């Protein structure tokens, strides 16, 4: 047990030096990024990296993303940065895009889970960049949640999962994107999107042309993290998928009646367009269907909120799988353990 210090970065007199010192000393600091909160440690210190896996209860075969504060730092991690990779960095860094590159030998095996590649990203958040810069080392940082839970988008979420297990939480308010980064394997030709996220396929293709997607590769996913049950609240989750929201609404209402008649405490994760129509114990509105960015921002917050209310079942409305909708549906389906009903 350690004492977990929570520090507001917007507070008067805040200095990053203290947090950077914790990283330099091999400790763990949770910090805000534009995607979700990250759990940071010195990426070049195997002992510190082991601490991340311990605090999260993360399986050791799931590699970590290394965060940098400057594009040039990528050359300390990989000596094989291709032209398309450079173009993506220039277009989207700092931002929610992670690139999988051939790794240099000095990167600890714990980071890469023994793979010969390393995942790298430059986050678009002033506090994250300042922490990495002040620590003076690349910072390994998976999402700052207990493994399997929805990712944290506020400092309170981090505290709920990791209180007593990490040295420090930097509180920078709610995260702007709300979903994790897009992960791209740049060692493949053409490059492959392994995890949909904050940067969309459409945006990527506008810069480097056609890319493949492989969110699942049979039973052995190329992105090891994608095989685990993930983003899951305690409650059972059902996703109602489809393109037509009136049909999604009708199907969700039918399911709601069914579970209420079984005396289940129900929660609905709804869009603003339909939220008022549900006689559920709890309805959480993630935002309007006309702004999928807002839906993404509130998604994990809503799953965690409904869980805190102690519902037995969460019925989540689905969204069209284009743009950021692809990432939204990927997270919802994983939260539901693929319990998806077509409207
Ligand atoms: P998290 O930081 O918790 O959002 O998870 C990082 C994601 O990136 C997981 O799905 C990992 O499996 C994936 N990842 C990290 N490093 C690599 C790598 N070298 N090759 C493929 N996927 C990776
Ligand atoms: Mg994660």
Image (cartoon, helix red, strand yellow):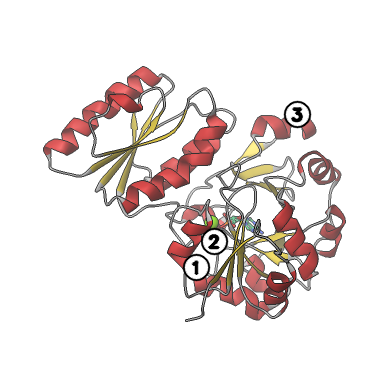
- Between the C-alphas of marks 3 and 2, the distance is 32 Å
Q: Residue at x 29, y 29 (%)?
A: 252
Label annotation for residue 206: 3
Write down the quadrant of residue 245 in the picture.
top left
Q: Work out whether residue 37 or residue 17 is closer to the camera in this orientation and state it.
A: 17
Relative to 91, does residue 55 appear above or below in the rendering? below
Pointer 2 residue: 144
- The C terminus, quarter of image: top left
Q: Which callout, 3 or 1, points at the residue further toward the start of the chain? A: 1
Which of these two is toward me, 3 or 206?
3
Q: Is residue 106 above or below residue 120?
A: below
What residue lies at 66% left-to-right and 56% top-to-bottom? 10
Q: Are marks 1 and 2 in contact (CB under 8 Å)?
A: yes
Helix, strand or loop status at disc 3 = helix
Q: How many marks?
A: 3
Q: Which residue is mark 1?
A: 56
Left or right of residue 143: residue 14: right
Q: Residue 44 location in percent, x, y?
A: 73, 73
Q: Is mark 1 within 8 Å of ligand 2?
A: no
| Helix, strand or loop under label 2 | loop
Ligand 1's image quarter is bottom right
C-alpha span from label 3 to label 1: 36 Å
On screen, residue 278 versus residue 55, left or right, reads: left
Q: Which is more foreground, mark 3 or mark 2? A: 2
Using the numbered discs, state the Cα–Cα distance from disc 1 to disc 2 in whole angstroms: 7 Å
């Amino acid at each position: 047990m350690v004492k977990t210090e929570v520090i507001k970065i917007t507070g008067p007199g805040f200095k990053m030096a203290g947090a950077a010192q914790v990283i330099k000393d091999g400790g763990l600091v949770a910090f805000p990024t534009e995607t979700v909160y990250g759990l940071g440690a010195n990426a070049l210190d195997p002992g510190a990296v082991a601490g991340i896996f311990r605090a999260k209860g993360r399986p050791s075969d799931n590699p970590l993303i290394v965060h940098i504060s400057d594009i040039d730092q990528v050359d300390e991690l990989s000596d094989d940065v291709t032209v398309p990779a450079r173009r993506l960095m220039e277009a989207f860094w700092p931002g929610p895009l992670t690139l999988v590159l051939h790794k240099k030998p000095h990167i600890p095996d714990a980071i890469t889970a023994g793979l010969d590649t390393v995942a790298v990203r430059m986050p678009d958040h002033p506090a994250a960049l300042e922490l990495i810069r002040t620590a003076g080392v690349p910072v390994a940082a998976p999402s700052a949640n207990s493994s399997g839970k929805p990712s944290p988008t506020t400092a309170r979420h981090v505290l709920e999962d990791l209180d007593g297990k990490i040295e420090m939480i930097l509180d920078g308010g709610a995260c702007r994107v709300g979903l994790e980064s897009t992960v791209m394997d740049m060692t493949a030709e053409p490059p492959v999107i392994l995890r949909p996220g904050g940067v969309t396929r459409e945006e990527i293709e506008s810069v480097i042309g056609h890319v493949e997607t492989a969110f699942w590769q049979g039973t052995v996913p190329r992105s090891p993290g994608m095989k685990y049950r993930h983003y899951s609240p305690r409650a059972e989750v059902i996703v109602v998928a489809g393109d037509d929201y009136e049909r999604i609404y009708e199907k969700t209402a039918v399911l709601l009646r069914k579970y209420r008649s079984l005396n289940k405490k129900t929660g609905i994760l709804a869009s603003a367009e339909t939220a008022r129509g549900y006689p559920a114990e709890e309805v959480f509105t993630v935002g309007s269907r006309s702004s999928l960015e807002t839906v993404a921002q509130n998604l994990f917050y809503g799953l965690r909120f409904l869980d805190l209310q102690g519902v037995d079942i969460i019925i989540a409305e689905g969204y069209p799988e284009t743009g950021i909708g692809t990432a939204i549906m990927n997270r919802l389906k994983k939260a539901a353990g693929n319990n998806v009903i077509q409207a």
